Each structure stands twice: as C-alpha cells, then as structure tokens.
Amino acid sequence: MSVTSKYDAREVENKWYDYWMKNNYFHSTPDEREPYTIVIPPPNVTGVLHMGHMLNNTIQDVLIRRARLQGKNACWVPGTDHASIATEAKVVAKLKEQGIDKNDLTREEFLAHAWEWTEEYGGVILEQLKKLGCSCDWDRTKFTMDDDMSEAVIKVFVDLHNKGLIYRGYRMVNWDPEAKTTLSDEEVIHEERQGNLYYINYKIEGSNDVLTIATTRPETIFGDTAICINPNDERFTHLKGKKAIVPICNRVIPIIEDEYVDLEFGTGCLKVTPAHDENDKNLGDKHQLEVIDIFNDDATLNSFGLQFEGQDRFDARKAVTKELEATGVLVKTETHINKVGTSERTKAVIEPRLSDQWFLKMEDLVKPAIEAVLGEDAEIKLFPKKFENTYRHWMENIRDWNISRQLLWGQQIPAYFYGDGKEDFVVAETIEKAVELAREKTGKADLKAEDLKQDTDALDTWFSSWLWPMSVFDGIRNPENEEIKYYYPTNDLVTGPDILFFWVARMIIAGYEYKDQKPFNNVYLTGLVRDKQRRKMSKSLGNSPDALKLIDDYSADGVRVGLLLSSAAGNDLMFDEALCQQGKGFGNKIWNAYNLTNLWEVSDAIEQPNSSQVALEWYQAKFQTVLLEIEDHFSKYRLSDALMSIYKLVYDDFCGWLLEIVKPAYQQPIDAKTYNEVIAIFEENLKLLHPFMPFLTEDIWQKIATRTPEEALIVAKWPEAKPINTALISQFEFASEVISGIRTIRKEKNIAFKDAIGFSVINNEKVNDTFDDVIIKLGNLEGITYVSEAVEGALTYRVKSNEYFIPMEGAIDVETEIKKLTEELTYTQGFLKSVQKKLSNERFVAGAPEQVIANERKKESDALAKIETLQTSIKNLQ
C-alpha cells in the first residue's frame, strides 16, 4: 500500500475510466445471469451537458453500478435522438450564414448538410457523460436515424397503417410558423397573455344598420366567411337571414344561427373564420361555409390580405387596427387576458391551420397502457406515485396523434402518391413494394418507380423514440432475437416528468402493441433542477452553472454527491454549489482515512485490545443496519436518503469513531488482527460508496491491494446481509454520549488530553461494561470506578440517570470553578422562574397552540435537570 498526501481527481478520473473501458466492464452480452437493463433517455444529438442531464444520468449510473455489484448482467444502452425541429433549425441557421437558402436545396442536398452537422456536433454530450463517470455500454450506442432504427420506424408506420390505425386527414392542426411544421397537441404550451379585445362594426347589407363584433385577432377578418348569432338571443332577431359586409375587404357574408355562440362573451356575435380556428372550422363544416386561408406558412399574410400581403401577422394586426380606426369602424379596444398556444421547441405563437396530415388513432391503443399503470394489477410503477394523476389525465383525455412534420430531417413518411386524388397513394416499406401495391390498386401493370412520388413530410421525432426500448435491441425488425428476449422488458427508466406523456406513456403504448409486454418495470421521475431561489435553471437567466466546470472544480465524485444530496425523490432539486464542495470534502475525508491506515505499522506480535475488538463488532452491526436502510431507500428510489445513510456511516461512524478507537498510540504499531479487520471493513464501505463515488473508491480499492482486472471494485461483490446485534448498537450510543461528556469537560476546563484523569460512575441505568475500555481509551481515563454515591471534589454530568464524576483536584482552580458554576446556576434559576411564570398564566396556557405549550414545558424540564446537575457539581467541589 502506498501513501499519497493529496488526491488528484483529474488524474484519477482519466486513469480509471480508461481502465474500465480497456477491460470492457461496461459491455453486456446475454448470459445465464439475471439481466438489469436501463435505456438512456436519448438527449438531442446537438445537445450539450446541462444540470438536468447531470442529475438524470448520475441517478442511472448509481443504479447500474449497484446492479453490477449485485452480480447482475448490467446493460445501460446510450444513444441520441435526431430531434427533427431543433436540429433542422440549427442546420438552416448554419446554411444561412453560408448564404444558402434551404428552399434552394433538394432533399438529398439538405440531408447531406444535416448529416455533416450531426457528424461534427452530434454525440458531444455522450463524450461529456464519460466525464461524469457514466458506465454506459458504449458499444451499443444508438442514434434514432441509424439505418436499422429508421427501418424499424418505417416498419411500424406501415404496420399501423395496414391495421387501419394510421390515416391521412384534412384537419385543423397546430402550426409552428417558425419551424414551418405541424406540432402535436402535446407539443403546444398554453400560456396566459394579456392582449386586446377589438370591437368592430360590420355593416348589414342593404341598410344603414351595423353589427358590432368583438375579436382578439382583427387581422383575420380577411378570412371571415360568416357571422354567427345565437338563435335564442332576442337582441339579434331582426338580423336573421340577412348578410353582413366585412370591413376593408367588403366581402358579403351570411349571418348564421347556432347555439354554440356564447350570449355573454363580447357582443354576443361571433365572426367565423373556418381556416384559422378549430371551433370556427366545426361551425363552417356544419353550415357549409367557404374556407379562406389568409396565411403563408411563415404566418405572413397571403394575397387574401390585400394591401397587407407579406406582412407578419402581428405587424398586420397593428396595421389593420389602424385602418379600421381610420375608416371609423373600430368602436373601442379593451385589454383582455386569453390563452395563447406556443411551440414547446421554438416558443413561436402557434397558428391553427387546416392541412392534410397523418394521424394515429389512439383510443384503443391507449387502453393497455392505462391498465398497466393505473389498473388493479398494475405492472408498471411510477415513482413518486403522485404522477399517476398526471398520467391518468393525459391518457384519459387523449386525442389522435398528429405524427407528420413538414421537415426534411427525420424518417420520410413511406406513403407514395400515384395520382392527384386524396386516396391516390400506397404505403410500403420500400419503393419496390410501393410499385407492386400501386399496380394492384390501379390495375396499371406498367407503373414504374418514377411514376410514384413519396410524401415529402417526415415523421414526428417521438414516433421513433417511442420504440426506443425495443428498437435498441432490434426488437421490431427481429422480434424473436436473443437480445430482445433477454433484455426486454427493461428494469428502470429514469426521466423527467415533463416527458411523462411525450415519451414514457407512448413507450408503454408501443410496448403493449408490439411485444404485448411492458417496456420497463419502474419509472423514476426526477425533479427539475432549480437554483437556491427556486428558479428553473436556464441559459436565459444565467443561473445554470457550466456542468463540465463543476466537475473540473469539485471532481466528478464531488458533483455526483452534491447533486444527489440535494435531490429528494421526485421533488425539484434546489441546487447549491456548496453541496458539491461538501461532496469534494467528503472525498477528502475518505482519502485521509485511507492515508491514515497506511501510516500504521502493523505487528503480528501484539494481541488485539479489547477496545478494538468490541469496536469492530459494533461497527459490523452498524454497517448491517445501514445496509438494510439503503436497501429500503433504493427500493423506493430515495437515492438521496441512501447516500446520506452511507455518508453518515463513513464520515461519523467509520472515520469519526472506529478509526479513533482502533488507532494505535503515537509511534506505536497496530496489531495485525485489528488492522486486517479495519481494511476489510474499509473495503465493504467502498462497495457501498462505489455507485455514488466511482472514481475515488476504485482508486483506493486498487491502492489497498494489488488486484487483477477480475478483482476490480466495479465488479466486486455487493455486501451480504447478516444478523444484526442491535444491543451492541444501543450500548455504543450510550457509551458515545459518555465519551462526549468527558471531551466537553476537558475542553471547557482546558484539561490537556495527554493527562489521564480519574472517572467514577453511579450506574443507575445498569449499563454493562462492554464499552468501558473504549471509554477509557477515548477519554484517556485512569480507569472507571463504579460507586454508589456522589464523589466529592469532582465535576459531574449525566447521561440519562447515570451520574459521572471527574475529580478536579489539582486540575483546575476550585474557587474560580465554583464561582463560574454559581453564576450559571443563578442564570438558569432565573430562566426557570420566567418559564414557570408563563406556564402559571391561565390565559397563556388556554390560548397558546399545543406545540408552544409543549416547548415551554420542555424548557422547564431541561432547566430543572440543569439546575440539579449544577448544584451537584458545586456541592462536589465544596
């Protein structure tokens, strides 16, 4: 064993990660062992490590390393998601810098740029995860646009279409005018925003009458095709069957009747714009109204917007309002709060838009997934359980999933058109199969591949990641392969609650559809990482630390400990950098403990002291207690609590007590039996710590003894549970209080520790003498004398009803000590009097909360006990 004065985290982390990689410890192949499988929530291919990733992946690494130590065949599959919208936006921005317009490129040319971008920037985050110590099976790294992964996605699309579950429909969709694509309902965030309500007069055709309409979007008047009144509204009976004239564009539109109109909102009249509002579209369909789309795909006005053509919708709103005002038809404007849909990705305000899109029917698909989580015999557990309500809300209110996106980066929809009609298409995995199907459908035997035109849309990114637990093991293309049968279902999924529906629920749906099995057993939903002010960490707020700099400053182990100490299960994490410093300090404590044991000279000629023997027996019992505790914490995904239990065991019990008890006297050797047992215990501690602090623990483990690769800590055996001597634990707790009392008196009376002192006890508690040798050693006592009455001329203190006496003759100035104790007694008696006065006040006792009264009574009992101790000490010194 070697002694190193300082722990160099940078050197150690690189050294041992390379060692683990070289010896292939992270790689898994099916064998006879029990599998333990985690699939990583694939980060965006263009992403970089942030605090959310740090927390999520630290938790996964803790779980996978523990499973490895438990002898399971641990497999953690890493990978990245192609992130259609985010990646395409970055590629478009880069092309723009080069003076290239995406629209001037063919699909193939654009995809070449996208792949170039992905190869240059993609996967950076996976390399960064290695700095954190993540023990993923890097040989299994997957990308959602890999050929085999894309093939699986296309296969599923074709299968679901053939089952009648995927259909093409002309529907009102959520349009992101920045990304120029549709979004599913779940990708739209609804925010309350303050806007205006504009009151506009519409002339009634053939008269001087006007009708006032209230709208939040005056720019959409160019798409008005009717005005709707409630047939029960007596205010507008005279308008039935008449027509109105739309301001500015002067289009004549009918006045229709429908009970859908809210009598109380605005003026009780509704302008109907079927192309730009879902409810208006429903009214339009019912009353067979014309549909006029006034927007281009970037939400600028098209030719229907007349002189406002080309203007952005928000600029057009101002310009139209100005014109309405100038022509005298704008009656008034009021402030108004309404809900505005925004894109989760680009933050752009969503535009409702009619479009031909692909949808997946969800009504029947969702049923097994609801039962799996919420049923009586639920197979999948969510941690914390509170998220079941969120899951229920999403799943029971599910709508058909819009799975097509107007993007190039992604799996191209395998629909091939052979004509101009809406149904003139076939769906197939390959162009060859499409030609064959088109010939069958049309009866045209001479149809060729060039006669078909593939749909230009790509599939929603989530439509690939919902297959992730299956597709990473090739379970879609080859459903009976050895790996999918061995690794699936996976064990634990660790992710954020923000994608409980987007990803988690959809994976469950896909799992039951394609394997008739759950995709995982447990879902642990982490909290969001927030700062000390409870603000969500973000680049815009500037409150998110640089993840890699944290590792550089505090070590990977220190950061892992810091993150987990501040992360209560499922609750938001209040991140404080000081916790990383605490983690680093904990690492130094363990390192110093290792160095201390190295400084000891070991002798075979010395017998084991009784104090060491009993201390080691106590620590073994304490260790087993903590082992049970952490097993319970792990079963409930309380990783922070598990770490804290280990932290206290190592910091307080091992470093603070055990090493102090067994430590040999200055420049004296330690007996070999004690030394060997201490090292064995140290090794058991390292096993418990390894999932949380992999680098430091592996380094110390390898320094303790020369190890073969098969004996590395990463593949060591998790400690075994053994019977617990609980009596020994409680006896030590009592002894530790006795020792603390001695140390307090030594400190207060400035008695040097090198000076041995006398010690007597009235053993009212009938405590046995098991730990007497420990008390004698740590208190530097001449011995322990059991007495039946108080010792005169001694200071005293109590532990429960036991009284302890330390003779002070020659050690202190008795008169000064009596004076000091008398002053303290007088103060305590005065304090007691004030408390008792309060408790004798009937009004106070009757009106104060129960807890306040309990606190005052405790103050009274504590003061009485202290007075008795002080009086005894003064009496003994007189």
Image: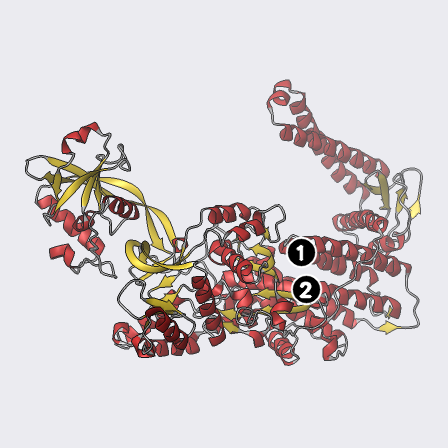
Quarter residue 861 falls in: top right
Q: Is residue 13 above or below residue 205?
A: below
Whether residue 444 can be seen here: yes
Q: Residue at x 87, y 54 (%)?
A: 776
Residue extending farthest to the top is 842
Residue marked by disc 1: 634
Q: Is residue 796 above or below residue 293?
A: above
Q: Are marks 1 and 2 in contact (CB under 8 Å)?
A: yes
Q: Amino acid at mark 2?
A: Arg
Residue 203 as seen in the image, left or right of residue 592: left
Residue 583 at x, y = what percent?
Answer: 62, 61
Residue in the foreground of this view, choosing between 652 and 40: 40
Q: Amino acid at mark 1?
A: Phe
Question: Dot 1, how many residues are within 10 Å of its Cα: few (below 14), some (14-19), or many (20+)?
Answer: some
Looking at the rendering, in which quadrant would you find the C terminus? top right
Residue 771 as seen in the image, left or right of residue 336: right
- How many labels sit on residues? 2
Residue 381 at x, y = what percent?
Answer: 60, 52
Q: How is the image coloured?
A: secondary structure
